[in-house]
Image: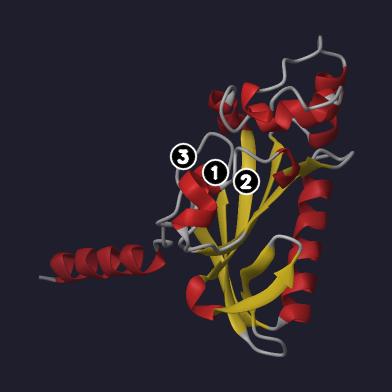
Amino acid sequence: MKKVLVFLIIVIINLSCEKAKAQVNFIDEIDKNQFQVMDVNSLGIVGARDWYNPDPTLGGAQTNIYGEFSLSMIHKDGGQEWVMSQLTKPALPCPSRYNNKCGSNNVRIAIHRLLVEDKVKLIEFSKWVFFIDKQYLEPFTEGTDEGMVTTYGTKENSSFEVILYQQLSGETVWTEVERRMVNDDGFSDWESSFIESKEKEYN
């Protein structure tokens, strides 16, 4: 009887400690038709942001119906090493979806090729996402040269929940690391300090 109780306790502890898995494949949600959505710094941190957009007539296949998120990733062998390796490679072809408007920046071309042409190489990168669910986002409509445009964001001076997910190199599942209730300033401080720590860790 004691052995059964010990076994049940162990099972309960393991279940309670198991981290939540994300229901969103964040890489797939990134707009692959816009060359400006991804960037990279000299330390090799690749960054992208995707905004909540529930309207399929505006977003088409790239409509994000989940919420707002920012993605950061860095190569397992070191961010700066990856940047240098791309600079010394022969010129990469610009993905056809950008209509040959990539310019000559081989590093920028390389990070955009990771979304489609070289997607198999994403397994070599450790990745983190700060995610804000759509329930915390409000519509903001304003006039532009193209007419009235509606975007979504957090309400000014409000608190909202941010979930940090990670997918380390070699992994294929997004796992929850932490969640916090924050305001805009608290979120900005948390995200910037976290990314800075990853730059140091991987360089």
User: Left or right: 28 with respect to 193?
Assistant: left
Q: Residue at x 87, y 14 (%)?
A: 88
Query: Mark 2 — residue?
Result: 127
Distance between the alpha carbons at the discs numbered 3 and 2: 10 Å
Q: Residue furthest right?
A: 42
Marks 1 and 3, the one that precedes in the sequence: 1
Q: Residue at x 47, y 45 (%)?
A: 61
- Find out whether the residues at labels 2 and 1 contact each other: C-beta distance under 8 Å: yes
Q: Position of residue 194 (x, y in %)?
A: 75, 61
Mark 2 nearby-residue class (10 Å; few <14, some 14–19, many ≥20): many
Residue 45 visible? The answer is no
Query: Mark 3 — residue?
Result: 172
Q: Which mark is residue 27?
A: 1
Residue 85 visible? The answer is yes
Looking at the figure, which quarter contains the N terminus? bottom left
Q: Position of residue 22 (x, y in %)?
A: 44, 57
Q: Secondary structure at mark 2?
A: strand
Within the image, what quadrant is residue 82 found in?
top right
Residue toward you, 86 or 57: 57
Mark 1 nearby-residue class (10 Å; few <14, some 14–19, many ≥20): some
